[in-house]
Image (tube, rainbow, N blue to C red):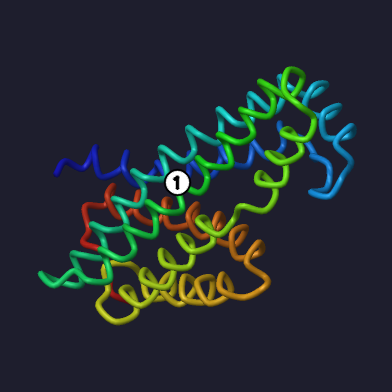
Amino acid sequence: MSKRWEQLSAITGLVAVALLVVSFIVGGEPPDFDAPASEVVAFYTEEDSSVLAASVLAAYGALLFLFFAGRIRRALRAGEGPVARLSAIAFGGGVLASAGIALFAGLGFALADAADSIDPAATQTLHVLSSDLFMPLAVGIAALFLATGLGAVRFGGLPRWLGWLALAIGILAVTPLGFFAFLAGLVWIAIASIVLCVQAEEGAPSPDR
């Protein structure tokens, strides 16, 4: 695989994080999940352009995140060898996390597109799902970071300090502080992208420590 492709595949994580952060900013602060239907409808009607833009940005972020998950799988597999169990779990977690992000993006898009033309109760239901349907994302993040951390610490393929950080994030993801695990995960992905990109530029194998 060429050095150029290695760099591009590594940097997809950093670009995905940037898109997700911008989508959070652009989308604004939606009402609480238990807000009255009238308030929910008013928000998605008045802020439809912003929410639509945020949803599209998040969808692109989910797509690029898949490519980064593939790059993580390759790095872990290089250290793990032919069994490749943990690298497969990490990639599966990345796929599920990407699906979770895309699910939120799809719900946001539907709300912004249809809030002023469907029953307010339906809008409120979609809003509750958009606020609370986080389990797919949480499970994906936990699987990705736990498997990545274990793989990096046990077999290499990524710097061990990145592995220990990934383990901490993965453990945090299965606690009530899961939202903070997601935020920490974004920072980890950005750092890992830079590390992998530098390694590709130097033409060095992934270190095991």
- Tell me if residue 208 comes above or below residue 4 in the rendering: below
Q: Residue at x 55, y 27 (%)?
A: 56
- Who is closer to the viewer here, 100 or 28? 100
The quarter of the rendered structure image containing the N terminus is top left
**Mark 1 surroundings: few (<14), some (14-19) or many (≥20) residues within 10 A:** some
Q: Please state the horizontal and vertical placement of residue 206, each as a whole percent of the image.
A: 26, 64
Could you tell me which quadrant the C terminus lies in? Answer: bottom left
Q: Residue furthest bottom?
A: 154
* Relative height, residue 92 to residue 148 (above, below): above
Indicate the quadrant where residue 150 lies. Answer: bottom left
Q: Is residue 49 above or below residue 190?
A: above
Amino acid type, label 1: Ala
> What residue lies at 86% left-to-right and 27% top-to-bottom?
42
Looking at the picture, how far across and down is residue 180, in whole percent? 66, 64
Give the camera-side residue of 107 and 18.
107
In this orientation, which residue lies closer to the viewer: 83 or 37?
A: 37
Q: Percent from the top left, x then y, of residue 62?
A: 46, 41
Q: Quadrant of residue 76?
A: bottom left
Q: Which element is circle 1 on?
A: helix
Q: Position of residue 124 (x, y in %)?
A: 76, 38
In the image, residue 188 sits, relative to residue 47, either above or below, namely: below
Q: Which residue is mark 1?
A: 99
In which image quadrant can residue 20 be found?
Answer: top right
